[in-house]
Image (tube, rainbow, N blue to C red):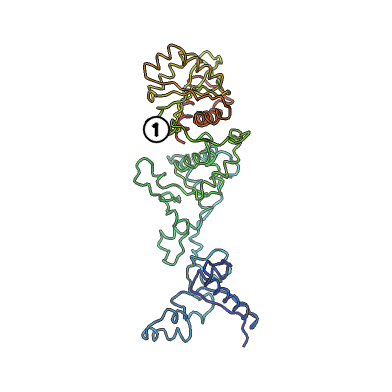
Amino acid sequence: MTVDHLRLWSDAQVVLEWLTSGCKSKSRFTSNRLEDITSMKLKLQEQYNCDISHHYVATTSNVADMLTRGLTAKEFVKKTSLWLHGPDSLGGTSGQWPTSPLYCLSDEAMRAVDLQSQQVTIEPSEQQSTTQPIININDFSSLKRLYGVTAMVFQFINKLKHRQADAREQAKVYWLKTMQEESFVTEISYLQAREKGKTTKSTIVPKLLTSLNGFLDETGTLRCRGRLSKLNKYSYAVHNPVLLSKDHRLTVLMINDQHRRCKHLGVGTTLTELRESGHWIPGGRQAVKRIIKDCITCRKLNALAFDYPKMTSLPKERLSFIKPFNNTAIDYTGHIFVQDEGGDMKKMYVVLYTCLAIRCIHLDLVPDLSLKSFLQSFRRFCSTYCVPEFLYTDNAKQFLASQRVLNNIFISDEFQEHLTQHNIKHRTIPVMLNQPVRIKAQQHSKSKLQDAQRGRQQSGKLISSSLWYETEEYSRHVSPTYLMLNSV
């Protein structure tokens, strides 16, 4: 007898995965059985000199299950034909074999298994029809410009059709749908087929839809159904964010846009801003980290000459939280050139107030380093937040200029009277004789103030590095800066 091809059938998809992809099982018993099957295949190939392939058969058509699972006499009489001749489909060609979904097989295993009769696919007519975009997205480096140019095209179309619509919103929906049609063809095709009632229980559900509970909204955009629908703080877009592809050019532009909006404050803040704008990226943290690592501005601001020393235990001022700004540290920034009403350039300064217990700061613009200006700033601070119990200043040498100003202010009779009147205690970071010990003692006392300084400098440089502002205009930029820093 001549054998041309030998087919091995199994109703266990996990076993097919092990046999075809070479995955190792954790069970010693299973590993031994796989070795037995492999050795049996080699013997059959040597004996008959034929090809051997693996196939999947449903449990209801598996003759071997009649022995392993057991059945009654009445059930055996009903399945006598199956026992004697096997499934009826074996008599036909491979194209007539029954189809079954393969949920447990990897791509490598599916390529090894003959899937002509096993894989459930959607008809070509149900595939998403993709058209060439009217604008090449790779020609744009800014999301604002991309939406602006596309909005002008839609504005022209609306004018021709005498249609009243928001052109910018049309541009946004257009690019989101274009991105999804290119990246999520299988998911959109499945959802469209399900809406038309063309899916069955055996149809494979894409894993992305199962894990994110995806659905199509009224505009045909693919969204994820979240679990915050009863939270009234956020809108419908945040409750059901739009699904973005982590590798698409539009996603890169959106991440860069949100990164600039949050003043280059890092991966976590950028990802939070992106999600609060109503967008979701599978593997979002890795995608954001990969994209913003090439940000030139962040590289300049985050470049460090050396590593910081190890931190010691936190002082009690950092751990005792009664209310915000109960323990407040104060410092001045460097001078900033602003334009007055007469058009002349003059120096102004920013007073930085930071809470030692929580990461919140307050920035206030003052015209000079005089006592009067500081007292007015301090009174505005107390009226906005509260009267602090303790005020801290540092002794770092790199802040000697601002430290001399603070010392002159704090030792003045007028300010001492103000402190006594409001029962405010002034403290400085302890200075010890031993320099290494002093550095250790000052680390945690200064870390909050330095963190706030670095955050303000990182955001402030973006505002004032190469631009001249009038006084009122710069004040409008200071408020969003510390608002963004406090939201981190």
* Front residue of this view, candidates 367 and 356: 356
Place residue 55 in its image quadrant.
Answer: bottom right
Spot occupied by residue 286 in the image (x, y as percentages of width and height): 54, 47
Q: Classify 98 as above or below 271.
A: below
Q: Is residue 455 visible?
A: no
Q: Which residue is mark 1?
A: 321
* Front residue of this view, candidates 46 and 92: 46
Q: Is residue 90 visible?
A: yes
Determine the secondary structure under disc 1.
Answer: loop
Residue at 51% x, 52% y is 181
Q: Give amino acid for label 1.
A: Phe
Residue at 42% x, 12% y is 414
Q: Classify 98 as above or below 334.
A: below
Q: Classify 74 as above or below 421.
A: below
* Front residue of this view, candidates 173 and 16: 16
Spot occupied by residue 277 in the image (x, y as percentages of width and height): 45, 41
Q: Quadrant of the N terminus?
A: bottom right
- Number of other residues with Cα within 10 Å of mark 1, as a class: few under 14, some 14 to 19, many 20 or more: some
* Front residue of this view, candidates 429 and 352: 429
Spot occupied by residue 191 in the image (x, y as percentages of width and height): 44, 57
